[in-house]
Image (spheres, helix red, strand yellow):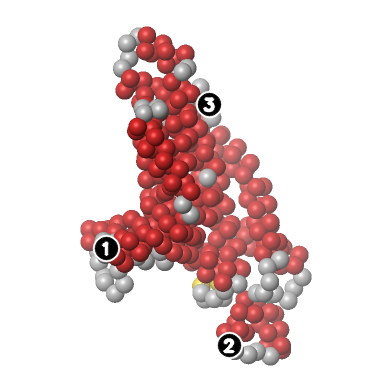
Amino acid sequence: MTGSQAAVVFRFLRRRVWQVAPVVFGIAMLNFLILQLAPGDVVDVLAGEAGAATPEYMARLRVHFGLDKPVWVQLAYYLKNTLMLDLGFSFRQNMPVLTLIMERLPATLLLMTTAMGVAVAAGLALGVLSARFVHRAVDRVISVFVLITYALPTFWLGLMAIVLFSARLGWLPSSGMTDIGVKLDGFAYLRDVARHIVLPALTLATFYLAVYAKLVRAAMLEYFGADFIRTARAKGATETRITLFHALRNALLPLMTLLGLQLGSILSGAVLVESVFSWPGLGRLAFESILARDFNLLLGILLFSSVMVTLLNICVDAVYALLDPRIEL
């Protein structure tokens, strides 16, 4: 990368960061206000678990947690602490929120990366095959498969995968990231994690696989009728080269656009998958924080997820310039 290209990239990143900063700030404020509408708080949960608690004791707990102050005062404290990268303290987990998020983040990133890698690779392959053999038996079989995978609910698919591949066949583990009570390292540890991630990653990837396959098929069929494809055929290019180097490269642009838009939904889908498979990631942690009314932890997860989605969208915009030379940063 030359000095001028690096300067262009730096200006692009600086401009985009300044653009998303107000968005992240608005998301943080909106998350806080919405959670204030939820019934109950962590004091109610603690009192319920204790079996009984006097109103005086619950009032002292609310003073201790800062829940006795007006909403606008709590919001001001929350925004000030967020700007200082202080996401608060989880009273249920008895740990700082940022520490909890950093502990669970690798598992979620591993699951999301694996699932999206499978979804994109399989979606591209099925979409290209379906467009290459349009209106033939291959196209019809792929269309039926895509329709079925698109219609299946994610949580139901995960439960059926556990019943079949874990309970009945015993091929794969049903929960967790590693075997409990077994200390492994090196290649044995990686193999154990790989065995545990198969079912949750394939479950999470199934829906997106179907979406990407349909999108790539439609884009490929549109480009097959374009003038530059006819020119390539007139010059004697083979159908394989036309498919892979002409049509597919252009079809990647709408795929990247959709991928950037779906990053948020991928995180929401991970909540279901991580809960079903007891995967120790941010999605399961968010679900547990909802049940425990641990709003400090939930706010931290929502804010961190929002920041991660905005940063990934900036990366997607940068990839556009690599796929299409006509697009400039």
Question: What residue is rendered at 53% in x and 50% in y?
Answer: 265
Which residue type carries mark 2?
A: Ala
Dot 1 and dot 2 residues touching (CB under 8 Å): no
Label 1 crowd (10 A; few <14 / some 14-19 / many >=20): few
Residue to which mark 1 is pinned: 169
Name the quadrant containing residue 231.
Answer: top left
* Residue 154 position within the rendered picture, expressed as x and y whole percent measured from the top left: 46, 55
* Residue 34 position within the rendered picture, expressed as x and y whole percent measured from the top left: 69, 61
Residue to which mark 2 is pinned: 50
Question: Disc 3 on helix, strand or loop?
Answer: loop
- If you read the primary sequence from the N terminus, does the residue marked by circle 1 or circle 3 appear first? 1
Distance Cα–Cα, label 1 vs label 3 = 52 Å
* Residue 161 position within the rendered picture, expressed as x and y whole percent measured from the top left: 36, 59
Q: Nearer the viewer, residue 4 or 210?
A: 210
Q: Residue 328 carries which label?
A: 3
Which residue type carries mark 3?
A: Glu
Question: What residue is rendered at 68% in x and 68% in y?
Answer: 38
Q: Residue 118 carries which label?
A: none
Distance Cα–Cα, label 2 vs label 3 = 61 Å
State whether residue 271 appears in this view. yes
In this image, 226 relative to 237: left or right? Answer: right
Label 3 crowd (10 A; few <14 / some 14-19 / many >=20): few
Label 2 crowd (10 A; few <14 / some 14-19 / many >=20): few
Question: Disc 1 on helix, strand or loop?
Answer: loop
State whether residue 109 appears in this view. no
Question: What residue is rendered at 37% in x and 13% in y?
Answer: 233
Q: Quadrant of the C terminus?
A: top right
Dot 2 and dot 3 residues touching (CB under 8 Å): no
* Residue 144 position within the rendered picture, expressed as x and y whole percent measured from the top left: 41, 41
Which residue type carries mark 1?
A: Leu
